[in-house]
Image (cartoon, helix red, strand yellow):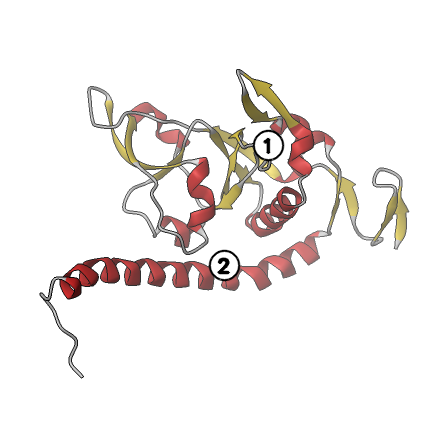
Amino acid sequence: MVYNEELKRKIPATWSAGGLNRFIANEKTGDWGKESAQANYSRKVTCIRGTDLNSILQTQQINAPERFILEKNTHKLLQKNDIVIEISGGSPTQSTGRAVYITDEVMSMFNNPLICSNFCKAISVKKDLYLFFVYYLWQYLYDNGIFFGYEGKTSGIKNLLYENFISSYKVALPDEELLSRFNSAVKPLSSAIIANRKEAMSLLSVRNWLLPLLMNDQAKIND
């Protein structure tokens, strides 16, 4: 362990200090599009809103709406290894900054290509092995209320001061070997979470279909 001047504490000798911007390759803004296909708004997508972020990795029903966007805006579609971040919204007790990661398994849960709403933005990491480290560190900071200190207000709506945060908030950063080991450990757990999530959605669909039949005596359960 060695003392790090930026963090004002000791960190492992092979680690460094810096902002999360060193892991981020690019960013994509969101798009709300139209409720129905019209004129050039012809590309059908599922739009991930801030309110949908928690439900994607948990057991609540996902109510992300289907929308239609301009064909020229398909560069905003979410891709593998993106992280979607809520940048506007929140409340006095809930900061902005809620997030969810996007993997092939996550995208397979939906019937359409994915996009985030214009109250969110998507970031892409520079290397695949950075995805889970950035996401879980981000989630840790969110759970500990760090983002309350990086919010501004516009017309009464709280906005995450994203650029300021990723460049000025310093964290301890592991070396590449440890990041690779962490990614290898977490990736199969993520796949299991999504597999269980998809099974739960399937069971929920069966329940919603079967329960009215049972209640109306249209179906019966044999002994």
Q: Residue at x 58, y 41 (%)?
A: 126
Give the residue at mark 2.
190
Q: Is residue 196 visible?
A: yes
Q: Residue furthest top?
A: 155
Q: Quadrant of the N terminus?
A: bottom right
Q: Nearer the viewer, residue 30 or 180?
A: 30
Residue 219 in picture, x, y percent from top left: 11, 69
Q: Residue at x 31, y 37 (%)?
A: 65
The amino acid type found where label 2 is placed reads Ser
Give the residue at mark 1.
92
Disc 2 secondary structure class: helix
Task: Find residue 30 and report its image quarter.
Answer: top left
Q: Is residue 79 visible?
A: no
The amino acid type found where label 1 is placed reads Pro
Few, some or many residues within 10 Å of mark 2 (<14, 14–19, 20+): some
Residue 59 in picture, x, y percent from top left: 41, 56
The answer to whether residue 2 is left or right of residue 209 is right
Q: Is residue 201 above or below residue 219?
A: above
Q: Residue at x 35, y 50 (%)?
A: 61
